[in-house]
Image (spheres, rainbow, N blue to C red):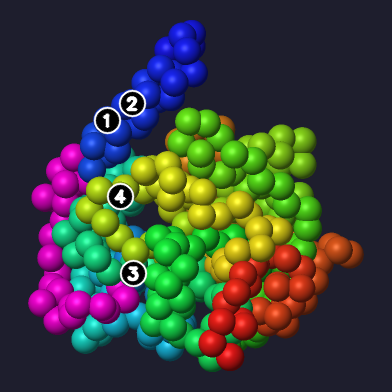
Amino acid sequence: MTGGPPALRRAWSAWRLRWKRRALLWRCLRAGRDLIPLADRTAAIRPGDILCFAAIRNEILRLPEFLHHYRRLGVAHFLIVDNASTDGSDRLLRDQPDVSLWQAPGSYRAARFGMDWLGALLFGHGHGHWCLTVDADELLIYPDWDRRPLPHLAAHLDAARRPAMGAMMLDLYPRGPLDRAEAGPQAPLADRLPWFDPAPYRCRVMSPRRNRILHGGVRERVFFPGEPDRGPTLNKLPLVRWNRRYVYVNSTHSLLPPRLNDQYDGPGDPRLSGVLLHGKFLPDSAARAAEELVRRQHFVDPDGYRPYHRAVAAAPVLWHGGSVRYSGWRQLLDLRLMGRGAWLSSDG
């Protein structure tokens, strides 16, 4: 409806978004019937536990630090969907006492890039919990994260009546070619990939969902210099006090109902937010990009992104004179890549 009084247009838009949300929820529930439980330990989940949800495939290089980092942050239980890994990821996860694991043998792309599978698990197990939905190559940090774990953060957000916290995905990379990390596989991610682009980034609001689209950074600079809006979307809403009425629309970039998307405006937002340290460019990134040229499971238009995957498969150097070496969350706070709100002064 393009004409008519503003109030009528708003009502029409709200009605359409409600039906969109319900259709996505039904889609998630249908997808959930295809999940095969490999290790279901969800009976151990207690009220108040913070839960972590992820869909993975062949992440054996990232899983040890992923599990260690989020356990340190205070995640009580992991609910993970494995999409037919062949590198032993499923065996590693099945042996973890705080992990429930499902197998999804179907198409990652057809499952809305895994969000239908995770939506089913969030619906079934996340209601009432603070839920962290992340990829295996994303490590969430926020101001004072090394001293105040997620239970403290969740209590602060509850007191502020905030149902979600946003985060920017920050691509880390080595100084040399992408197939050569700067430290060994046992080293922390920020030692293996210590560089990032501090700027520029730009964020815009889209109607009618009020979702944000944050662009910029190294992948835009290197791979999409002539088509910046084709670069990856970098804003996410990974931490949400979940309700069965909620659903992710586009990865964790946006949610329905639309009001949840108002919780994060990207870099420069003064409210408390985080950064997802992104370990995409570990030494296996070139081989994974070459595989994606065949699998075609990422992006809505995989053919349109073949040049991107070919470029990553060539293991280029991403470092340039404007690259900055990562030194910790205070540095990201000073660069306004995350916000603090009243968090650091709220309880000493």
Give residue 35's quadrant in the image. bottom left
Q: Residue at x 70, y 72 (%)?
A: 332
| N-term mark: 2 or 4 | 2
Check residue 19 in the rendering and tell me which mark sits there, or answer none. 1
**In the image, is residue 39 part of the stretch drawn in magenta?**
yes
> Dot 2: what SS?
helix
Separation of marks 2 and 4 at Cα, in angstroms: 15 Å
Q: Is residue 25 left or right of residue 8?
A: left
Whether residue 27 can be seen here: no
> Could you classify mark 1 by the number of other residues whose Cα lies within 10 Å: few (under 14), some (14-19), or many (20 or more)?
few
The residue labelled by disc 3 is 130
Separation of marks 4 and 3 at Cα, in angstroms: 13 Å
Tell me the kind of residue under disc 1: Trp
Q: Are marks 2 and 3 in contact (CB under 8 Å)?
A: no
| N-term mark: 4 or 3 | 3
> Could you classify mark 3 by the number of other residues whose Cα lies within 10 Å: few (under 14), some (14-19), or many (20 or more)?
many
The residue labelled by disc 4 is 246
Q: Residue at x 63, y 48 (%)?
A: 214
> Dot 4: what SS?
loop
Tell me the kind of residue under disc 3: Trp
Q: Are marks 1 and 3 in contact (CB under 8 Å)?
A: no
Tell me the kind of residue under disc 4: Tyr
> Could you classify mark 2 by the number of other residues whose Cα lies within 10 Å: few (under 14), some (14-19), or many (20 or more)?
few
Q: Residue 53: give x, y in percent of width and height.
A: 32, 66
Q: Are marks 4 and 1 in contact (CB under 8 Å)?
A: no
Separation of marks 4 and 1 at Cα, in angstroms: 12 Å
